[in-house]
Image: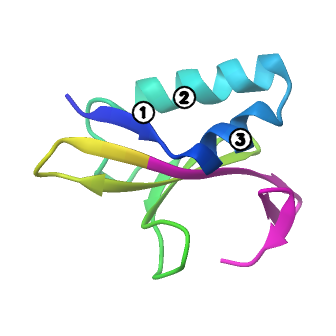
Amino acid sequence: MFEIELTPEAIEDIHQFRKYDRQKIIEGIETQLTQQPTPETRNRKKLRPNEIAEWELRIGDFRVFYDINKESQLVKIEAVGYKTGSRLFIHGEEYQL
């Protein structure tokens, strides 16, 4: 079982959403990333090299960006953003992956 760690930036990102959305994001992280965070699925994919994170988890319009350390069984959540159409917003600013 993998341990989940959130960076201070990811905690800030989650707090900017409504309570219902926060619960949905946290539930998605717990169900999708604690057991097997590495297999690619319909909602989880490995990203091209970028400055945020190696992996992306899709939870509705929300995107959770994370890195995995297999040796220490740790999933580190780097950022949480949301998509509007084809535009991605992280830390309140539009971002291009």
Q: Where does label 2 land, which residue?
A: 28
Q: Secondary structure at mark 1?
A: helix
Q: What stretch of residues is rendered in magenta?
A: 77-97
Q: Is most of the magenta stretch helix, strand or loop?
A: strand
Q: Where does label 3 land, which residue?
A: 12
- Toward the front, the furthest residue is 8
- Say if mark 1 contacts mark 2, CB within 8 Å: yes
x and y percent of residue 22 in the render? 72, 25
Inspect the image, locate mark 1, and give the three-letter code of the amino acid beneath it: Gln
- Number of other residues with Cα within 10 Å of mark 3, as a class: few under 14, some 14 to 19, many 20 or more: some
Inspect the image, locate mark 3, and give the three-letter code of the amino acid beneath it: Glu
Residue at 47% of width from left, 80% of height from top?
Answer: 48
Q: Is residue 74 above or below residue 24?
A: below
Q: Where does label 1 land, which residue?
A: 32
Dividing the image into 4 quarters, which one contains the C terminus? bottom right
Report how far apart the C-alphas of labels 1 and 2 lie in the structure.
6 Å
Foreground mark, 2 or 3?
A: 3
